[in-house]
Image: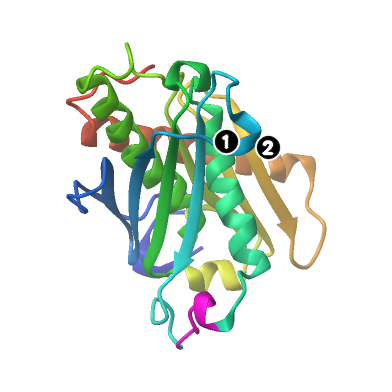
C-alpha cells in the first residue's frame, strides 16, 4: 500500500505545535498536522451557563469554524449564511464533550472555559486536530488560573487526544489526509485519554461492511497514534505538570 508522502500505514503526519499563538487568550496554540492547520484558543469567563448557576461546577465548551479559503474552493462564512451547519454543530459539540470529560468541573469552580478552534487550512482531520490542540490550549488556560491563585490545583484528570484511522485498498491506515479520507472504505475518528480509555469512537463504512477483526486493527492503530500525540502534548506543555 502506497500513500502520499511515502508514509507507512502506521505513521502519523508531521505534527507541529506553537504555543501562545494568540497572546490575549488565557491559553492558545497553533497545531499543524501535515498541511492541516488549526488555531486553538482558550478563554476563561467568570460565569457559567444558567443551568449550572449556583451548582458549584464549572463548564468547558467549544466553537469550531473553517475559514472561507481553508479548503480548495471558497466556503461562505456561516455568519453570512445566517445559520450554523449541522456539521459545525456536531464537531463543536464533539470537541466540548471530549475536553469536558477530562476536567474536574467542580474543582474548576463556577467559571467557563471556551475553546475556539478555527481551521486555517484543511487537509483531513480538522476535528481530531482541534481536540488535540484544544487540550493544549485548555491546559495552558487552567494553569493560568492556578498561577493567579483562583484554583488550588490543575483540574485535569487525564490528557486527551484524537486521531483518524481508516481502511484504504483493504488495509488499515493511520491519520488520513483529505485525499485518503475521500476514498476510504472505512473511516473512523477516535478519541482517547492518556489512561488508555476511549471517550468517543465515530466510525462508518463507506462501501462494504467491515469485520470485527478489522475494527480491532483500527483501534490498535488509533491507540498507537494517540499515544504519540499525547507525547507531543507533553513536550509542548513541559512547563505544566500534567496528569499521567
Q: In what quadrant of the picture does the C terminus appear?
A: top left
Please name whichever residue, 227 or 139, is drawn nearer the observer in this view of the structure.
139
In the picture of the structure, the residue carrying the numbered disc 2 is: 216
Would you identify the image quadrant in which residue 181 lies?
Answer: bottom right
C-alpha separation, residue under disc 1 versus residue under disc 2: 6 Å
Instruction: Name which residue lies at 33% across and 38% down.
Output: 136
Would you identify the image quadrant in which residue 216 lies?
Answer: top right
* Relative vertical location of residue 42 with respect to residue 186 in this rendering, above or below: above
Please name whichever residue, 218 or 126, is drawn nearer the observer in this view of the structure.
126
Would you identify the image quadrant in which residue 108 lies?
Answer: top left
Instruction: Name which residue lies at 54% across and 43% down.
Output: 96
* Relative vertical location of residue 242 with respect to residue 42 in this rendering, above or below: above
* Relative vertical location of residue 176 with respect to residue 164 in this rendering, above or below: below
**Image spot of residue 230 (x, y percent):** 37, 33
**Image spot of residue 140 (x, y percent):** 27, 34
Boundaries of the magenta span: 74-80
In the picture of the structure, the residue carrying the numbered disc 1 is: 220
Question: Is the Cβ of the residue at disc 1 closer than 8 Å to that at disc 2?
Answer: yes
Residue at the limit of the structure toward the right, as seen here? 209
Element type at mark 1: helix
Query: Is residue 55 shown left or right of residue 24?
Result: right
Numbered badge on residue 133: none
Q: Residues within 10 Å of mark 2 (few under 14, many from 20)?
A: few
Amino acid at each position: 500500500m502506497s500513500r502520499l508522502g511515502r508514509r507507512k500505514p502506521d505513521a502519523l503526519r508531521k505534527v507541529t505545535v506553537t504555543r501562545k499563538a494568540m497572546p490575549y487568550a488565557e491559553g492558545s496554540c497553533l497545531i499543524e498536522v501535515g498541511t492541516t492547520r488549526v488555531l486553538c484558543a482558550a478563554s476563561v469567563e467568570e460565569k457559567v451557563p444558567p443551568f449550572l448557576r449556583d451548582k458549584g461546577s464549572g463548564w468547558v465548551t467549544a466553537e469550531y469554524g473553517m475559514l472561507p479559503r481553508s479548503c480548495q474552493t471558497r466556503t461562505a462564512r456561516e455568519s453570512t449564511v445566517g445559520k450554523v451547519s449541522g456539521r459545525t454543530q456536531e464537531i463543536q459539540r464533539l470537541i466540548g464533550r471530549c475536553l469536558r470529560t477530562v476536567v474536574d468541573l467542580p474543582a474548576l469552580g463556577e467559571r467557563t472555559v471556551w475553546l475556539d478552534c478555527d481551521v486555517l487550512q484543511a487537509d483531513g482531520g480538522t476535528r481530531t486536530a482541534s481536540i488535540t490542540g484544544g487540550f493544549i490550549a485548555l491546559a495552558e488556560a487552567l494553569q493560568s488560573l492556578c498561577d493567579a491563585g483562583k484554583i488550588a490545583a490543575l483540574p485535569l484528570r487525564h490528557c486527551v487526544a484524537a486521531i483518524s484511522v481508516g481502511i484504504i485498498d483493504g488495509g488499515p491506515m493511520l491519520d488520513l489526509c483529505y485525499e485518503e479520507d475521500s476514498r476510504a472504505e472505512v473511516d473512523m475518528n477516535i478519541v482517547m485519554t492518556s489512561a488508555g480509555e476511549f471517550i468517543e469512537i465515530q466510525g462508518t463504512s463507506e462501501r462494504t461492511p467491515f469485520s470485527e477483526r478489522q475494527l480491532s486493527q483500527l483501534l490498535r492503530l488509533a491507540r498507537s497514534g494517540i499515544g504519540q500525540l499525547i507525547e507531543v502534548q507533553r513536550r509542548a506543555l513541559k512547563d505544566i505538570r500534567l496528569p499521567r
